[in-house]
Image (cartoon, rainbow, N blue to C red):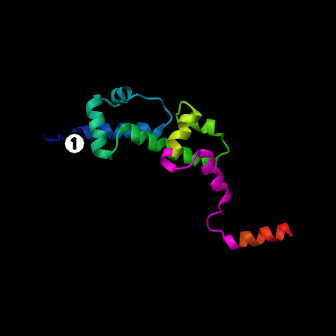
């Protein structure tokens, strides 16, 4: 069976779809709506996306949403539920499940680990000495 590769004239539509997904990862958007928005049929979009990016539209979108969630966990004090909402998840539990599947920690565990680890570029020994001085 011969595998049909994506036609070069379909690539701009696929790249436009990628830009739309990256611009607003939390946006609830079906593949049909995305295909209509960029002006290509669903089948060509799905197959072309997989050819170009080596993953499905769903996988790509999920990766973008989880990367944004990591950024929000690190840079903000938003609750896990607020981050789930901002990144387009229907529930905190669904978000936590996807996060754990990818990063092997819950969002809360990840945030706690980041808070406990020393600041990048700072000498860990000097932090321990500072703690010793404060405790005495």
Q: Residue 91: percent from the left, percent from the top? A: 57, 31
Residue 84, picture quadrant: top right
Q: Residue 25: percent from the left, percent from the top? A: 48, 37
Say whether residue 76 is left or right of residue 54: right
Q: In what quadrant of the picture does the C terminus appear?
A: bottom right
* Rendered view: 101 above or below 94: below
Residue at numbered disc 1: 8
Say whether residue 57 is left or right of residue 132: left
| Residue situated in front as seen by the camera: 61 or 10 | 61
Numbered disc 1: secondary structure: helix
| Residue 104 colored in magenta in the image | yes
The residue lying at 47 percent from left, 29 percent from top is 28
The residue lying at 20 percent from left, 40 percent from top is 7
The residue lying at 58 percent from left, 46 percent from top is 106
Q: Residue furthest right?
A: 136
Q: Residue 112: percent from the left, percent from the top? A: 66, 52
| Residue situated in front as seen by the camera: 96 or 78 | 96
| Residue 121 colored in magenta in the image | yes
Which portion, as a residue range, is magenta?
Answer: 101-125
């Amino acid at each position: 069976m011969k595998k049909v590769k994506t036609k070069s004239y379909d690539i701009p539509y696929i790249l436009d779809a990628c830009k739309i997904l990256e611009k607003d990862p939390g946006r609830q958007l079906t593949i049909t709506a995305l295909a209509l928005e960029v002006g290509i049929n669903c089948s060509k979009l799905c197959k072309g996306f997989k050819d170009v990016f080596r993953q499905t539209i769903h996988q790509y979108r999920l990766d973008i949403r989880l990367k944004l969630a990591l950024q929000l966990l690190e840079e903000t004090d938003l609750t896990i539920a607020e981050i789930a909402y901002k990144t387009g998840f229907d529930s905190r539990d669904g978000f936590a499940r996807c996060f754990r599947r990818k990063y092997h920690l819950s969002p809360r565990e990840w945030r706690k680990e980041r808070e406990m680890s020393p600041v990048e570029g700072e000498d860990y020994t000097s932090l321990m000495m500072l703690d010793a001085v404060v405790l005495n």
